[in-house]
Image (cartoon, rainbow, N blue to C red):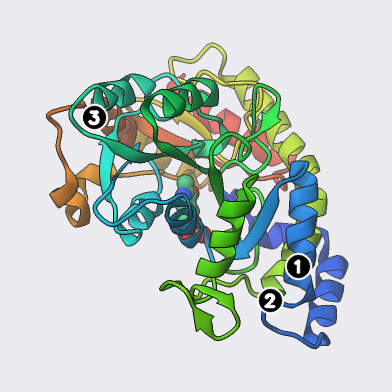
């Protein structure tokens, strides 16, 4: 009998194999181009991404962390400002807040969706803390309630940056995320729903003024070549990554549909199990398929015996990581749901190139563990 292959949590190489000729041709064309920095692939990708969003302006940047920082700065966040974000997210979201010079205010997550808890934001809004911005992280592929958040942004006067790094194409009330806040950031890290073959990111906004500021900040603060009007960064999207992303963008909707189909197969297999599955909104794009159980670590080990690799995203909330201790103030909000998620959440393999047999192996592994 042949050896079982590993079922991986994500598999960017399978995506390359699926469209190998198109990727190879795109890379060859980019290598033969005349401008290796901010050349025609970056411009074309920016146009194509904005067209896929249905308008607005997309700006290619070096990675998702920079995209969040650039959006915050372009939205007017100043050194010393307070910026709220969930404590259960990629640490990169908090890194970007601090890199923008701001002070993070950590919020809890809603235990039913694992997303930013609006009740905990509400407590901060009525406290003496004056927020300059909130980062709405559409974690695991599911949108935050942007209707309530934007209404509060109007009432309390804060900026909203959407962190869409795990949610390319996710919908809130029928509209793609990225359109609701003042600006939006995307990571195109290889395992993301729209992933490059290295680091890459996108900043998106419907505001021409914010777009202009991001364009300047991504390249040394230049408004005019060689003349900086403010201290910017070097956060340009690479031509080769842009060439790859142009190919991947053509498959993004189909890939997201396949992710949803896999999620439905998992849902059906787990319907009678005592595990917590998040309440799922219609526009979910399943960057991750998450389940929660008190027996999380044993389940992970048991799946590993069947050569199924499940992931723990994230093992520690950000407010428990020593780099961020100085910003922690638990007097206003309780962060216990985030702590519990770090203890109980498991991400099952989820990517568009899982075969039906792979999905069945994962499902059987979970079902027999609880049997
Ligand atoms: C929610 C979230 N924000 C930001 C980032 C940072 O993106 P990058 O790794 O491209 O800098 C990531 C990627 O891990 C992410 O998942």
At 44% from the left edge and 39% from the top edge, which residue is drawn?
A: 159
C-alpha distance separating marks 3 and 1: 42 Å
Q: Quadrant of residue 254?
A: top right
Up/down of 308 relative to 322, above or below: above
- Examine the image and state in which quarter residue 45 appears: bottom right
Q: Which residue is mark 2?
A: 38
Residue 58: numbered disc = none
Q: Secondary structure at mark 3?
A: loop
Q: Is residue 38 something that shows in the picture?
A: yes
Residue visible at 64% across and 52% down?
A: 208
First reached walking from the N terminus: tag 2 or tag 1: 2
Residue at (29, 53) in percent of width and height: 102
For the residues labelled 2 and 3, say whether their Cβ atoms are less than 8 Å apart.
Answer: no
Q: Secondary structure at mark 2?
A: loop
Can you give x and y, in whole percent of width and height, for residue 97 in the image?
A: 35, 53
Where's residue 342, x and y in %? 31, 36
Mark 1 CB lies closer than 8 A to ligand 1: no
Comparing 266 with 227, the one in front is 227
Is 361 or 239 nearer to us in this picture? 239
Disc assigned to residue 335: 3
Comes first in the chain, label 2 or label 3: 2
| Image side of residue 248 versus residue 218, left or right | right
In the rendering, which numbered label is found on residue 43? 1
| SS assignment at label 1 | helix
Closest to the camera, between mark 3 and mark 1, is: 1
- Examine the rendering and report whether any part of residue 187 can be seen: no
Is the residue under label 1 in contact with that under label 2 (CB below 8 Å)?
A: yes
Using a 10 Å C-alpha cutoff, classify the residue at mark 2 as few (fewer than 14 neighbours), some (14 to 19) or many (20 or more).
some
Relative height, residue 331 to residue 212 (above, below)? above
Picture quadrant of residue 168: top right
Q: Alpha carbon of mark 2 to alpha carbon of mark 3: how far?
A: 42 Å
């Amino acid at each position: 009998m042949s050896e079982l292959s590993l079922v991986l949590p994500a598999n960017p190489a399978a995506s390359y194999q699926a469209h190998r000729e198109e990727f190879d041709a795109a890379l060859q064309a980019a290598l033969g181009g005349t401008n290796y920095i901010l050349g025609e692939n970056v411009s074309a990708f920016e146009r194509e991404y904005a067209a896929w969003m249905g308008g607005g302006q997309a700006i290619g940047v070096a990675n998702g962390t920079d995209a969040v920082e650039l959006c915050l700065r372009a939205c007017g966040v100043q050194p010393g400002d307070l910026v709220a974000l969930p404590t259960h997210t990629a640490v990169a979201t908090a890194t970007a807040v601090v890199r923008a010079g701001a002070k993070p205010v950590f919020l809890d997550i809603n235990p039913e969706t694992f997303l930013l808890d609006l009740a905990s934001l509400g407590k901060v809004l009525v406290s003496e803390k004056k927020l300059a911005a909130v980062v709405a992280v559409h974690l695991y592929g599911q949108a935050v309630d942007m209707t309530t958040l934007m209404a509060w942004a109007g009432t309390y006067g804060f900026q909203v940056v959407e962190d869409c790094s795990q949610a390319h194409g996710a919908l809130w009330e029928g509209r793609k995320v990225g359109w609701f806040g003042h600006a939006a950031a995307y990571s195109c890290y290889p395992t993301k729903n729209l992933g490059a073959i290295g680091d890459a990111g996108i900043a998106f906004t419907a505001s021409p003024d914010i777009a202009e500021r991001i364009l300047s900040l991504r390249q040394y603060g230049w408004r005019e070549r060689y003349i900086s009007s403010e201290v910017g960064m070097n956060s340009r999207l690479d031509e080769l990554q842009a060439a790859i992303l142009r190919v991947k963008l053509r498959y993004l909707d189909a890939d997201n549909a396949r992710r949803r189909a896999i999620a439905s197969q998992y849902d059906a297999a787990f319907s009678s199990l005592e595990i917590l599955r998040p309440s799922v909104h219609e526009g979910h794009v399943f960057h991750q398929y998450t389940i929660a159980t008190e027996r999380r670590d044993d389940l992970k080990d048991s799946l590993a015996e069947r050569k199924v690799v499940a992931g723990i995203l994230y093992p520690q909330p950000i407010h428990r990581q020593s780099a961020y201790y100085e910003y922690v103030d638990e007097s206003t909000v309780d962060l216990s749901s985030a702590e519990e998620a770090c203890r109980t959440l498991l991400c099952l393999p989820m990517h568009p190139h899982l075969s039906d047999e792979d999905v069945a192996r994962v499902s059987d592994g979970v079902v027999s563990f609880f049997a």
